[in-house]
Image (cartoon, rainbow, N blue to C red):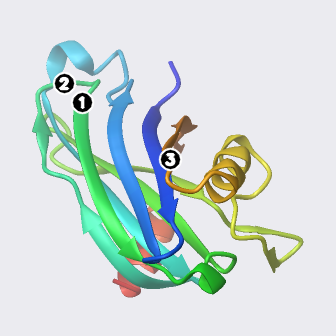
Amino acid sequence: DTRQVMFSLSYLPSPGQLTVTIIKARNIIPKNLQPLSTSDTYVKVALMCENKKIDRKKTGVITGTSDPIFNESFLFDVAEVDMKGVFLSLRVMCNPRILHTYLTFECFACCYVDRVPLGGSEVGPWSEQWREMLDNPRKPVTSWCTLKDVTSDTRRGSEDQS
């Protein structure tokens, strides 16, 4: 089963506020570990520009489920002219107690195409969500995002920027 997180994006141009709502996640713990383990799961949300963290937030920890429900919203101050150069990094952190270590999964709600910042996401399921958010101010746009495993090298590199 595919690991996913559902989130919504909304942008208010006049005050320059980007709202990110982390709604829920699913299939976080592999099926073969579910009978053996409970987990502590939370989501880290980082607003990034040129691979540097501008701001970051974190949900509360949800315990004991592979399908946590968060329903937490975060506000980021982003001027309208800066929206084309920023992107979001979502990291789902999961600690199955049987492993005694965190598993990390991530997706990016934005990025670059041919190294040119689009302000939306790389071509993929989030690009339309990002563009729809910009085209429809004040309207939340919700989507599922497929998570990728983060290797220890990737994790170490991102922790250096924390």
Tell me the quarter of the picture where residue 18 sits.
bottom left
Tell which tag, 3 or 1, sits nearer the viewer.
Answer: 1
Tell which tag, 2 or 1, sits nearer the viewer.
Answer: 1
Give whichever of 68, 105 is nearer the camera.
68
Q: Identify the residue at the far right of this view.
A: 114
Tell which tag, 3 or 2, sits nearer the viewer.
Answer: 2
What element does badge 2 sit on? loop
Give whichever of 26, 56 is nearer the camera.
56
Q: Amino acid at mark 1?
A: Pro
What element does badge 1 sit on? loop
Measured from the top left, where is residue 13 in percent x and y?
Answer: 54, 71
User: Which mark is drawn over residue 149?
Assistant: 3
- Residue 50 visible to the viewer: no
Residue found 56% across the figure and 37% down from its top: 146
**Residue 49, above or below 141:** below
The residue that mark 2 highlights is 65
Measured from the top left, where is residue 68 in percent x and y?
Answer: 24, 30
Residue found 43% across the figure and 42% down from its top: 7
